[in-house]
Image: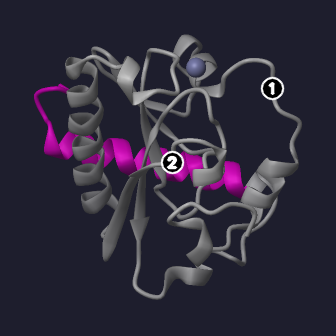
Amino acid sequence: MEEGSIVSRHLWAPWRAEYFRMPKRDGCIFCEAMAGADDLVLIRERTCFALLNAFPYTGGHLMTAPYRHTARLDDLAEGELADLIFLARRCARAIARAFKPDGMNLGLNLGAAAGAGVTDHLHLHVVPRWTGDTNFMTVLSGHRVVSEGLRETREKFMAALAELEPRAHA
Ligand SMILES: [Zn+2]
């Protein structure tokens, strides 16, 4: 695999290879997602937001990130750090309800050596896992299939969130 993150060594998702072949954008994908009407964004909170990973390791792979563009944990205030993990917990609950995984990876990859694909805007991965999922979804390939998968993932996630938090989504 092309990187050394905690999850990538155990999984193979064809579109991730494609991601690493893509030319790097000038802008930051997190800043662009949060500023625009990006349909990858799932939840906007006070200091942080949650978004789908466009190149998921597994179905339901999402991330939480601070609005603040920084690579350094030291730059985040206590409130931002708390928001980041609380939002990840909300997401994990909705993922558990929507996708019924056997387990989950939650993690920060800080720096390219640690497997970060985007190194200058830190983000917390929330990755649902299934027993024996090493080859999960390997039959899928190509942008069309991936984007359809993302739309379905988004719908299932938002439906689960609305069931868990009915007042917030009334
Ligand atoms: Zn950014």
At horizontal 46% and vertical 47% (from top left) the residue drawn is: 62
Q: What kind of element bears circle 1?
A: loop
> In this picture, which residue range is highlighted in magenta?
145-170
The residue carrying pointer 2 sits among few (fewer than 14), some (14 to 19) or many (20 or more) residues within 10 Å by Cα, namely some
Number of labels in the image equals 2
Q: Does the magenta stretch include residue 157?
A: yes
- In this orientation, does residue 107 appear? yes
Residue 147, percent from left and from top: 68, 48
User: Which residue appears farthest toward the left when viewing the image?
Assistant: 167
The residue type indicated by label 1 comes to: Arg
The answer to whether 153 appears left or right of 3 in the picture is left
Q: Is the magenta stretch mostly helix, strand or loop?
A: helix
The residue type indicated by label 2 comes to: Asn
- Establish if 51 lies above or below 106: above
Question: Residue tagged by mark 2?
Answer: 109
The answer to whether 71 appears left or right of 25 in the picture is left
Ligand 1's quadrant: top right
Question: Residue tagged by mark 1?
Answer: 25
Q: In which quarter of the image is the N terminus?
A: bottom right
